Image (cartoon, rainbow, N blue to C red):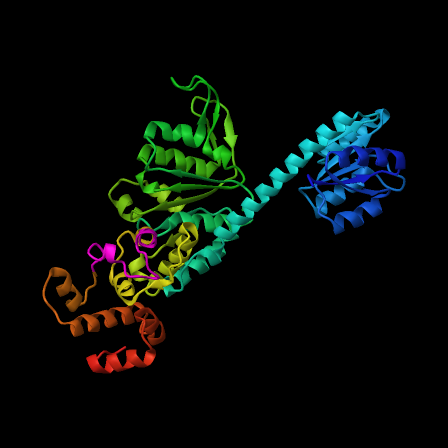
Amino acid sequence: MKGRILIVDDEENLVEILQYWLEDREYECLSASSAEAAFELIDSYAIDVVITDVRLERASGLDVLQYVQRVSPITQVIVITGFANVEDAVTALKSGAYDYIKKPFQKERIISVVEKAIERKFLLNENSILRSQILSRYDFQSIVGRSEAMEKVFNLIKSLADSTQSTVLIQGESGTGKELIAKAIHFNSPLKNAPFVELNCSTISDNLFESELFGHVKGSFTDARFNKKGLLEAANGGTIFLDEIGDLKPALQIKLFKVIEEKKFKRVGGVEDITVNVRVIVATNKDLKEEVRQGRFREELFYRLSVIPVFLPPLRERGQDVMLIAQYYIEKFNLEFKRSVKGLSQKGRWIVTGYSWPGNVRELKNVIERAVLLENREMLDLDFFEKELAPQSGESALSEQQSGSIISLEQMEKAYIEKVLSATGGNRAQASELLGITRKTLYNKMIRYGIKA
């Protein structure tokens, strides 16, 4: 079946002709002689295209069009009209019909319009599926973390989602997931169906920044061969995300401040003001307060951007989240690489929880990705990364081990247990899970080594 077509007309002969032509092209056809009967079929079947006469006995094709738009927006509607009723067809097009066909019509015209309508419906369906996947990917539940530090972040960004006008400043070290938070705010807000446009301020030269952000008019500079919309125009009605805002030069900071304040700008070389309604979210790995003190970031822009600041904690301060994130990526890369890794071995857990992760979540993700690919075993030991992921804690025993001093296994085990207990906030259930031992065994070891938690 190439598609399901519903024909709505009270002329029986016309319906039979259309059915014959369309079924000959392997379309499945349903028919209704009234709007009421059409409504029942639309409720009962997944219809790809509706062909309806603009004039029906007790209703109109516009009633059918409006019903389709309400209950199945991606279903396409084609209107049939007599020569004297072309105005009705124009009204239908303005109301959202795909196309119209005038009587008397030819077979080739009907088939051509139906085929194009089917293609449009399938394209809209694919776009709808992709949008659903995007929304689920950036749902709050998809952000991995149960630590107290991340719970504060979750609570804040959930409240931010409904506030579509305030600017948001996301601060955190490289690799902490600032872009993910920006997208979570956008895709969980009333703006989720509007554009989300991003620009990395550190990867674009100063002379191109204005053209990218504001657009330009033809002839405004050597390579400006045509008018170009900027990213602010592209994001109109939605969100623009400016990453690494701390790298923006002071002269450009002034122009950005003016845009945020006035919500209007001129294209490069242009004379007309362009007004936009855009939510601005920015991110940086720099301490902007210190940048202001050093004169590298304009104070007025800092206060305008930091209406609602979000601080992302580094991975080393997120306690048990490190194991949750590691397991999340193991499952992700199992699917991607067709592997069947179950998790981390005790040695793997020791390496993961003992390392400080200066590259944060991004570094952990890369390590797990390589491990899933390189280690051919059910439980990952992280042998390939043992040296580069040497524990970097402050405990004396682990510091001695890192510097090459010889210590006993008992000293190592004690230091490791202390670190895990510290990371879990003294939660023995979580600590025993991370260590890969029972709570009873953990309790016995704590007594043995004199560990208090």
> Dividing the picture into quarters, in which one does residue 325 lie?
bottom left
* 117 sits to left or right of 211: right
Question: Looking at this rendering, what residue extends furthest in the left direction?
Answer: 405
> What stretch of residues is rendered in magenta?
368-390
Where is residue 345 drawn, in percent x and y? 30, 65
> Dividing the picture into quarters, in which one does residue 436 lie?
bottom left
Using the rendered image of the protein, determine whether residue 87 is visible from the camera's viewpoint. yes
User: For the point 12% across and 60% down, which residue is it?
Assistant: 403
Using the rendered image of the protein, determine whether residue 307 is visible from the camera's viewpoint. no
User: For the point 81% across and 34% down, which residue is it?
Assistant: 20
Magenta segment includes 369: yes
* Figure quadrant of the C terminus: bottom left
> Dividing the picture into quarters, in which one does residue 426 lie?
bottom left
433, above or below 384, in the image: below
Where is residue 412 drawn, in percent x and y? 18, 70
Magenta segment includes 103: no
Where is residue 36 drawn, in percent x and y? 84, 47
Closer to us: 396 or 436: 436
* 7 sits to left or right of 13: left
User: For the point 24% across and 55% down, which residue is it?
Assistant: 385
